[in-house]
Image (cartoon, helix red, strand yellow):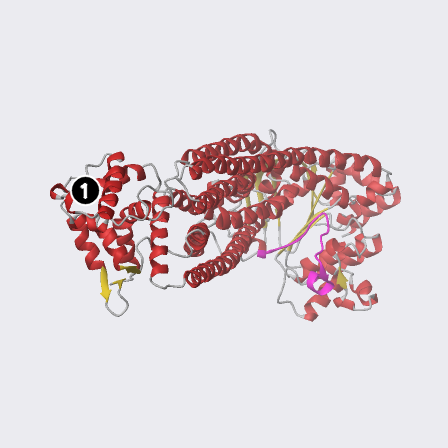
């Protein structure tokens, strides 16, 4: 997994910015349930009254609350209000939200007690004015001094208070009453107590002539406006975060493709053999795409989910609902589901990527070999082979998709089950007066937020293993040590001459047990042609690939101009070589760009001259656009012979010191072959030329012929010398030439 995160180091500033924006988004997201709760509990249930302490209160209400306060509280209560003589009401001295909240915390319970005692219909104490009791000494009170009406009220109050267990003769009568009611309120939640206090405030507002309906409407519009602003901020932040996450992921994908491509371009044939071409293509495309996709999700969801979950847990803890165990249960179930999915799915993703490689390999082989497949009527067999690879991949993908299909219903079951459990539990608490409807709604919303956060993590937990496998596969390519590299003090100066020396060279492939070449010893001098011939698989192509360091010799030394090729910088070495591979390769573009591929600065005359030497000028001129004629991918719109001639022209245009032709004349007819070699001899008179050939006619006039068999030199010399001294070469010559041609070749050589 670390390979995924290391790709983000370069874009740390984007990650930090996204994290900050996600905090803003989470704040808005987590504020909405509180506003929803406020709309229900404040806007609807309490008519838009936000505070337990009313902004305006009648003199009777002011003194009624004051009667139940201790001395310290009375001082704070008196400071909080200012008497308005013109209206005869008391008004808050400060409506600052912080000060108002402090007053709510200090007096909400007392106000609720007053409301319970004086305002609730059916209460034994409803309608009683307790403010006068605070000013009377009941222990010294003489009932005989009362009128009959006063005595009746006194006796009624005395009876009620006696039932409550309060001694009416106590000097702290009202504080004792307050204590009794506080015990009753102790079974209720803070939200219920606050709601009761707000009902007292509502009555006071109505007595003071405040329009409650207008107050409610203002609150609903104000809260709805805040919710709308929060939603707009969330949408804006989501768009910005989505843009930044996509930009970061695209940058990561671009960087990985560049790194992989650059690395692969520097691979020698040994490293290319380690990774199949199909696998390298998959790693550069599908694997990078997986990382790019999961990077977006990491920045958009994985960063957001913990912030949202933590915020949801903090907010839900503010509600003293006694239902926190439901959240713990839900999180536990989700984590168990994640763990099961992770350990079941993880091994399958590695298999999946390997099978993607296999499908690409089979598809690439079939598409490349369509002419051969059709020629031999093997379409059905190849269809079956592709179906086999495709079905294997399909089975694994179906397995992982089934996991996803099980995951979503299970998570929805957990979420809906949690909602039902919350509603069932909250209904009992609402019935007992311990919870308000708005608080229950907020609790459900926060619960869903927390569970959705874990749902996000669950979704990414399915994708992350596959992306982790993809990242490991890419890192495997990037961490591969290249065997063909420049030394620290590599020679960068071009050699003075192009003499190529093989000094007892042997070579074994990295995973091979035996040498492919053994004790190869010869010199290819400038101005002379060295030909290499032998049976198929004897190591001819491998030998010439050692010169440009496609491989490094296992034993011995290969030098150019006296410099060990391993001591020369790769760029310097290959700049001296014009290489024509055994399989002619052209690139999409036009004829001009293909010939100038190795010599970007070549002039039009140089390109035309190279084409003329390669005997390609005739068929180029026949084309409507000449050198500007298009070449399709792989050169499929030109014949094999034309493709070889363009490849030869490409090497000639570079004007190198060393020419290597790896069986590059096999598709040419004898006339073209003869004309090309004659024109080439003039061009290469100062260069070392090495020709790998199957046809003896191509190398009859070579200055030196090397005969290989099973990777060993069994002959070295001119054509005549080898006919006389090397039986294997003589047999090759006799098998390819008629008796007259064979005799003539010896005679012509002797005559020189």
Q: Range of the magenta residues?
A: 575-595
Q: Residue at x 18, y 52 (%)?
A: 74
User: Would you say residue 564 is visible in this rendering?
Assistant: no
| Magenta highlight on residue 224 | no
Q: Secondary structure at mark 1?
A: helix
Residues 134 and 363: in front is: 134
Residues 335 and 148: in front is: 148
User: Would you say residue 122 is visible in this rendering?
Assistant: yes
Question: Can you identify the residue that label 1 sits on?
Answer: 173
For the image, the number of numbered tags is 1
| Magenta highlight on residue 579 | yes
Q: Position of residue 221 (x, y in %)?
A: 46, 62
Residues 343 and 67: in front is: 67
> Counting other residues with Cα less than 10 Å from the Cα at mark 1, is it few (<14), some (14-19), or many (20 or more)?
many
Q: Position of residue 512 (x, y in %)?
A: 60, 31
Residues 541 and 588: in front is: 588
Q: Position of residue 747 (x, y in %)?
A: 81, 47
Q: Is 415 positioned to the left or the right of 582 in the image?
A: left
Q: Is 482 positioned to the left or the right of 735 in the image?
A: left
Report which quarter residue 541 is drawn in.
top right
Q: Is 369 positioned to the left or the right of 348 in the image?
A: right
Q: Position of residue 246 (x, y in %)?
A: 54, 55
């Amino acid at each position: 997994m670390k390979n995924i995160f290391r790709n983000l180091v370069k874009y740390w500033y984007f990650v930090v910015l996204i994290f900050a924006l996600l905090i803003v988004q989470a704040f808005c997201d987590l504020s909405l349930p509180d506003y929803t709760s406020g709309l229900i509990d404040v806007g609807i249930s309490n008519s838009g009254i936000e505070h337990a302490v009313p902004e305006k209160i009648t003199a009777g209400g002011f003194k009624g609350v004051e009667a139940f306060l201790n001395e310290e509280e009375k001082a704070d209560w008196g400071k909080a209000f200012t008497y308005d003589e013109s209206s005869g009401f008391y008004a808050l001295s400060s409506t600052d939200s912080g000060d108002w909240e402090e007053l709510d915390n200090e007096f909400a319970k007392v106000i609720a007690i007053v409301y319970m005692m004086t305002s609730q219909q059916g209460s034994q104490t409803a309608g009683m004015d307790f403010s006068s009791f605070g000013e009377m000494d009941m222990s010294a009170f003489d009932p005989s001094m009362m009128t009959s009406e006063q005595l009746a009220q006194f006796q009624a109050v005395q009876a009620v208070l006696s039932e409550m267990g309060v001694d009416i003769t106590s000097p702290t009568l009202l504080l004792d009453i307050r204590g009794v009611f506080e015990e009753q309120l102790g079974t209720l939640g803070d939200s219920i107590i606050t709601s009761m206090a707000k009902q007292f405030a509502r009555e006071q507002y109505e007595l003071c002539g405040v329009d409650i309906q207008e107050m409610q409407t203002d609150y609903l519009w104000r809260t709805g406006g805040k919710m709308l602003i929060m939603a707009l901020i969330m949408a804006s932040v989501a768009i910005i975060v989505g843009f930044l996450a996509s930009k970061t992921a695209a940058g990561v994908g671009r960087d990985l493709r560049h790194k992989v491509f650059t690395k692969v371009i520097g691979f020698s044939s040994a490293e290319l053999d380690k990774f199949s071409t199909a696998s390298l293509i998959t790693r550069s495309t599908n694997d990078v795409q997986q990382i790019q996709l999961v990077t977006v999700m990491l920045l958009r969801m994985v960063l957001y989910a913990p912030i949202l979950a933590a915020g949801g847990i903090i907010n839900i803890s503010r509600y003293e609902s006694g239902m926190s165990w439901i959240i713990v249960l839900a999180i536990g179930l989700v984590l168990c589901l994640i763990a099961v999915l992770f350990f079941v799915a993880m091994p399958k993703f590695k298999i999946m990527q390997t099978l993607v490689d296999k499908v690409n390999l089979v598809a690439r082989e079939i598409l490349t070999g369509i002419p051969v497949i059709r020629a031999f009527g093997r379409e059905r067999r190849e269809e079956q082979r592709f179906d086999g690879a495709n079905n294997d991949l399909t089975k694994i993908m179906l397995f992982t998709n089934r996991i996803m299909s099980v995951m979503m219903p299970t998570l929805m079951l957990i979420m809906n089950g949690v909602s039902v459990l919350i509603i069932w539990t909250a209904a009992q608490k609402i019935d007992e007066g311990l919870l308000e409807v708005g608080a229950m709604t907020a609790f459900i919303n926060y619960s869903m937020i927390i569970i959705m956060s874990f749902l996000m993590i669950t979704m990414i937990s399915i994708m992350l293993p596959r992306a982790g496998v993809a990242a490991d596969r890419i890192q495997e390519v990037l961490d591969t040590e290249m065997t063909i590299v420049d030394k620290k003090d590599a020679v960068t100066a071009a050699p003075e001459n192009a003499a190529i020396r093989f000094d007892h060279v042997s070579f074994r492939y990295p995973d091979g047990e035996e040498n492919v070449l053994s004790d190869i010893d010869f010199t290819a001098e400038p101005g002379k042609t060295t030909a290499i011939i032998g049976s198929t698989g004897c190591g001819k192509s491998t030998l010439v690939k050692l010169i440009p360091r496609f491989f490094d010799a296992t034993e011995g030394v290969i030098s150019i101009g006296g410099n060990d090729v391993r001591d020369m910088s790769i760029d310097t070495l290959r700049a001296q070589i014009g290489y024509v591979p055994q399989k002619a390769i052209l690139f999409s573009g036009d004829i001009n760009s293909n010939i100038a591929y190795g010599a970007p600065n070549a002039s039009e005359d140089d390109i035309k001259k190279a084409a003329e030497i390669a005997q390609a000028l005739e068929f180029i001129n026949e084309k409507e656009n000449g050198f500007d004629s298009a070449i399709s991918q792989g050169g499929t719109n030109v014949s094999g012979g034309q493709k070889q001639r363009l490849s030869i022209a490409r090497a000639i245009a570079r004007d190198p010191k060393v020419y290597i032709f790896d069986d590059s004349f096999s598709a040419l007819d004898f006339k073209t072959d003869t004309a090309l070699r004659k024109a080439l001899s003039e061009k290469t008179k100062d260069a070392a030329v090495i020709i790998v050939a199957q046809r003896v006619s191509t190398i009859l006039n070579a200055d030196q012929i090397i005969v290989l068999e099973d990777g060993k030199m069994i002959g070295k010399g001119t054509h005549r010398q080898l006919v006389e001294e090397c039986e294997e070469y003589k047999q090759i010559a006799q098998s390819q030439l008629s008796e007259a041609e064979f005799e003539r070749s010896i005679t012509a050589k002797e005559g020189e």
